[in-house]
Amino acid sequence: MTLANIVSSAASVSQFHDSSDQEAITAAAASHSEGVEKGRNMERGRISAIISADGVKGNAAVMEAAIDLAVKSPGMSAEDIVSFATAHVHSVPTQKTDMSLSSRITPDPLAGAVGGVSSREQRSTAWGTAMQRAGARKLHNS
């Protein structure tokens, strides 16, 4: 129920009740709104503590498990979630990205893999060999 709904219902009630009832309803609506905001802030703090904890921060697998557990177990403390996730999830090693992207890309990944011959040359040679064998079979079978 939103604050607008509470206030509008309070306004409709005011036709039938005295001003003290109206004040009580308005006070209840205000305290409800304050409680919702306080709860949101507490949950944001809990999630922030989870994702910034040692063992979680920078580890995608552990962070995913911790957030999933936090959503499914709203009553569990941030400390308990972090300790469970770091103890039970196998972490995926993070890649070091010290090298630039251009230095990590090779134009031909198979170049030099077989005696210094590029993959284009290998494909050309393999295709020629396959065609020769196919022709030899065709001549042999006729």
Image (cartoon, rainbow, N blue to C red):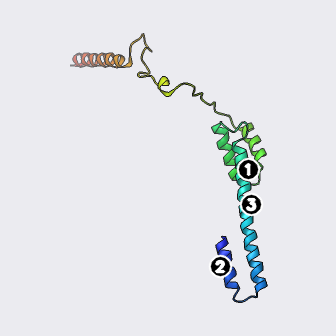
Residue nearer the viewer, 112 or 46: 46
Q: Position of residue 129 (x, y in %)?
A: 31, 15
State whether residue 136 appears in this view. yes
The x, y position of residue 141, in whole percent, is 24, 19
Q: Helix, strand or loop at disc 2? A: helix
Residue toward you, 38 or 142: 38
Instruction: Work out how far the residue at label 3 is from the one at label 2, CA to CA, in angstroms.
Output: 23 Å
Alpha carbon separation for disc pair 3 and 1: 12 Å
Residue drawn where x is 72% and y is 56% of the image: 41
Q: Earlier in the sequence, mark 3 or mark 1?
A: 3
Where residue 99 sits in the image (x, y, percent)?
54, 24
Q: Amino acid at mark 3?
A: Lys
Q: Quadrant of the C terminus?
A: top left
Label drawn at residue 128: none
The residue that mark 2 highlights is 8
Q: Is residue 50 above or below residue 32?
A: above
Label 3: few (<14), some or many (≥20) within 10 Å? few
In the picture, the quarter occupied by the N terminus is bottom right
Give the quadrant of residue 133: top left
Q: Are marks 3 and 2 in contact (CB under 8 Å)?
A: no
Q: Is residue 6 left or right of residue 101?
A: right
Tell me: residue 104, above or below residue 26: above
Amino acid on which disc 1 is placed: Arg
Expressed as whole percent of the image width and height from the top left, the position of residue 135 reads 24, 18
Which residue is identified by label 3? 38
Residue of label 1: 46
